Image (cartoon, rainbow, N blue to C red):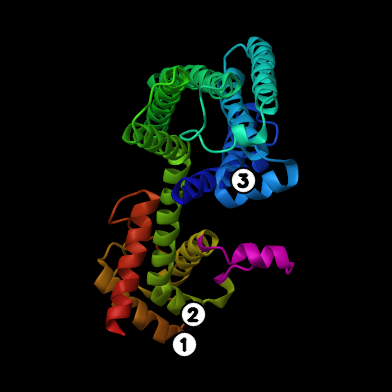
Amino acid sequence: MELLLLGLLAALVWKLYQWKRSPHDAPLRSVTLCLLCAALSYPVAMPGGASGVDTVAGHGAAKLIQNVLLLLAVYFLMCFYLYSAADEDAGRRRARKEAVVVAVVAAVITVAAVSVPHEVFAGSFSTADMTTPQISFFYGAAGLYLTYALGMACRWTRRYARMSRRPHSTGLWMAAVGLGAMAVACAIRAVIVAVRAADIEVSKPLMAAVAFLLVASILTFAAGITYAGARARISSLRLWLQHRRDHRRLAPLWELLAETYPDNVLRPASGAALDRWRARGVHRRYHRRIVECRDGLVDISPYLLEDGDDSAVLNIDAAELAARLRRASARIEKGVAAPRRAVPLAMARGSDRESDVRQLIAVSDELRAAA
């Protein structure tokens, strides 16, 4: 139960963050409310939460609230697909009709729950007396609606999964498997209600297996709807770590050039606290260091050519360039004037930006090794 709640909370936090960034996104709002209702239903179902709710609102209130929250969760899940449909107006009309259905189901199970004594309604699904018509109707009606809503959601999810590309399709297939398994578990529970209503005993291992299937399916669904976002976050983290590592590897080259040409060091846009905070970001510092290194190499390039060398482009390997940079820096410190105009550096490792960065890092590594 704790693992399930943690999985739901992780998915809920991620969707709340996305909803905050896009507050007018109706499909996103629906899936967030779905997760919120599902997450709220589990503390109410726990012994401590159930006893607290029952103490305040009366015996059996916790069970009723839990089931109503589950009905709302699957309703909002259906709304996610309805709002995502190509015909938005038709989707909204269908969502309003489904709202009437879930309201009727919630009303009838509420009537069934309050029409029996509290002691009859007490207990869990596995211990409830299903021979009481109101109890069997309570669990049966809720189970049938959950089966219907989850089955429809599974069908729509599979349709979107076929139309999508990775990584979104992977997450959608995971969500579809979770929804399908939940629908199967709810259908089995509805059959169990009918069997027990006929005063036929159901084995405890079967009840435990259905409960485990329900928990596993919810975790699979939660993992599916967060898969694409989590994968994107992991990719962003990898890029952040790479930029942080490359920023440090460029330090020897940058320090040499920054000491020689301090005016090339870029400053924040202003002295405001926000601009200073943004300037400390890893990506900004990484790109700024690349620009500063390139500017410094352009400025120091006249000192890098050997005597008698009139090349239009400086094309030497990283080790030789590092050695010439050290000598050029020493000449500049002595006040030697630039012997010629600036000379561009050849892109020996390719013409794209990544090749440029690899070339700068190679030179910087040579400087570090020499030091």
Is 22 situated left or right of 312 in this image? right
First in sequence, mark 2 or 1: give its number: 2
Q: Which residues are magenta?
A: 264-282
Q: Tell me what residue is drawn at x 44 percent, y 22 percent.
A: 196
Question: How many C-alpha atoms fall within 10 Å of the one at disc 3: few (<14), some, or many (≥20)?
Answer: many
The residue identified by callout 3 is: 50
Mark 3–mark 1 distance (CA, rounded to whole Å): 77 Å
Q: Amino acid at mark 3?
A: Ala
Q: Quadrant of the C terminus?
A: bottom left
Is 238 located above or below residue 318 in the figure? above
First in sequence, mark 2 or 3: give its number: 3
Q: Tell me what residue is drawn at x 49 percent, y 16 percent.
A: 152
Q: Amino acid at mark 2?
A: Thr
Q: In the depicted view, which residue is nearer to us: 4 or 81?
A: 4
Was residue 349 drawn as part of the magenta stretch in this picture? no
User: Can residue 306 be seen?
Assistant: no
The residue identified by callout 1 is: 333
Q: In the depicted view, which residue is nearer to us: 244 or 87?
A: 87
Q: Which mark is residue 72?
A: none
Q: In the depicted view, which residue is nearer to us: 303 or 294?
A: 294
Name the secondary structure under disc 3. Answer: helix
First in sequence, mark 3 or 1: give its number: 3
User: Can residue 191 be seen?
Assistant: yes
Q: Position of residue 115 (x, y in %)?
A: 69, 24
